[in-house]
Amino acid sequence: MRHLLCTIGFAGKTAEEFFALLRQSQLECVIDVRQNRGGQLSAFAKYPDLKYFLANILNVEYRHEALLAPTPALRRAYQASRDWQVYEAAFLKLLKQRGVPGTLDTSAWPAKVALLCTEPGPEKCHRRLVADILAEYWTGAGDDVEVRHLVVDRNAAMHAEVKIAPTIKVPLPNRPAFSSHSSQQKISEAGSGLVVEITGSGARLGSQRVASEEVDRAFGMPIGKLRSRAGIESLSYATADQSELTLAAEAATHALQGAKTTTNELDWIIATSETHHAYPSLAAQVHKRLELRENCAALDVGGACLGLLNALATAQSFILSGQARKIAVVTSDVHSRTLIPGRVAGEFGGLFGDGASAFILGAHCGERALHNQGEYSLGRFFFGCASQYADAICVRDDAEGGLAVRFDGEALSRAAITRMESVIAAVEAYSGILRSQVGAFATHQPNPRLVKLLAKRCNVPASSFPTVARTSGNLGSSTCGVALYVALQDARASERCNRKPIFLTSLGPGLLFGGGWLQP
């Protein structure tokens, strides 16, 4: 049998460099030999995040082998003395006491593995000692072994090659003409790459601006509670002549105008809302309001606060597969007519406002710069479900026609911050873009206080999170959309060369989560 035995340390490497080194070696499994794999200083290599990143970025298995890790006492002794020779002798003695390598079932390991530890290089890291022992053991059994230590040489050309593409591109034929009779035409010729880009965006808030103190009073809460506890100064409420339909249609019209796109050019409209429960569906009603052609398809997707990312990912898939050229994605929520005093408690209902957002997505072939109306291209989206938090928030109809709400605010807040921080780290790893290089974070905003805490936890300026919840409240599935609209408007006001990437992160009840990024 032939073994490729690599070693790698995460310290001193960006996520881009770390995952690129593993990808270039075509590994099948990473074996963690750290004693402390969940430390706060582990960044993208913190467990269990690393297991998730390896599976979803590289399709690589993750294992932890405690028999190959030093003891806490041994680590502390070395950190105090920094005497490598003493540490090496003690560690080799420890492995002998554990019966390594004979006690390891390495027959279950794939042929191409990497031993993971912390140190940037292998010279003074126990992973090198383990690699030497395993290589000797396998060679003695008649196997062919190659040991390779994966390091970054910033003076070599290789460093320029460890690059993770920031946008999704797939082989694509010459662009066919999509007309009112060919919206479902497949793309089947060979040619350049396809990029999905946002060419126009729009947003519409409820026209009635209500001070948070008025909401406190309406829900029977102490005056000033929303402002002091949640950081909400005002909420946007729909007026009597506004609804999910009118807000969505106005946002979509704005987006179409920005994209210089006519309604006849749309192949799909994809809508999401957590408050619209009438028939026909929101997508069908917006379809009628905009007077779209009959063979422009309409689709509603769920996900509540995660709805925008679900809709964008669905639209991106349709375009990449050749099912469409231009798609309108709309979100719209009117909470003020559902989460009302007497039906829900103020600690929950008082957080929410009304609003809508819309985006026009289009396909672009080739490597040219985005046209003047094009704003940002879409990167990759990823999703998951941390169902251990599913009971933190539950809403259902009760027997009297009201709403039964279970809302554990403290537990949900902790879960939201921890999960969004992890998703932002995952977006970094997927995109190869450091959070310090990001212009805006268009995220879900449960309330402004949690946004500030998230910014602090992620070590990024709070100003990089577009203001939504502070002045409009939590807009549900439209929060992330309005935040993205604000971020795109701010970017458009600057020179194209100065525009920076945008990270998308959102959560939904369940606890659903997802992330992605946009590249200028």
Image (cartoon, rainbow, N blue to C red):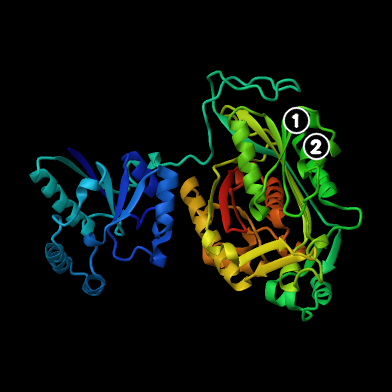
Q: Residue at x 68, y 76 (%)?
A: 229
* Residue at the disc numbered 1: 296
1 or 2: tag closer to the N-terminus: 2
Identified by mark 2, the residue type is: His
Residue tagged 2: 287
> Quadrant location of residue 340?
bottom right
Q: Quadrant of the N terminus?
A: top left
Q: Nearer the viewer, residue 509 or 76?
A: 509
- Residue 328 percent across, percent down from the top left: 72, 38
Residue 459 in view (yes/no): no
Most distant residue in the left direction: 140
Nearest the viewer among 241 and 378 is 241
Say whether residue 255 is left or right of residue 186. Answer: right
10 Å crowding of disc 1: few (<14), some (14-19), many (20+): many
What label does residue 473 carry, if any? none
Describe residue 234's horizontal placement relative to residue 127 as left or right.
right
Q: Amino acid at mark 1?
A: Cys
At mark 2, the secondary structure is: helix
The crowding category of the residue bearing disc 2, from other C-alpha atoms within 10 Å (few below 14, some 14 to 19, many at least 20), is many
2 or 488, nearer to the observer: 2
Q: Say whether marks 1 and 2 touch (CB < 8 Å).
A: yes
x, y percent for residue 52:
43, 52
Q: Give the image location of residue 171, x and y in percent.
A: 52, 26
Nearer to the camera, 317 or 469: 317
Cα distance, mark 1 to mark 2? 8 Å
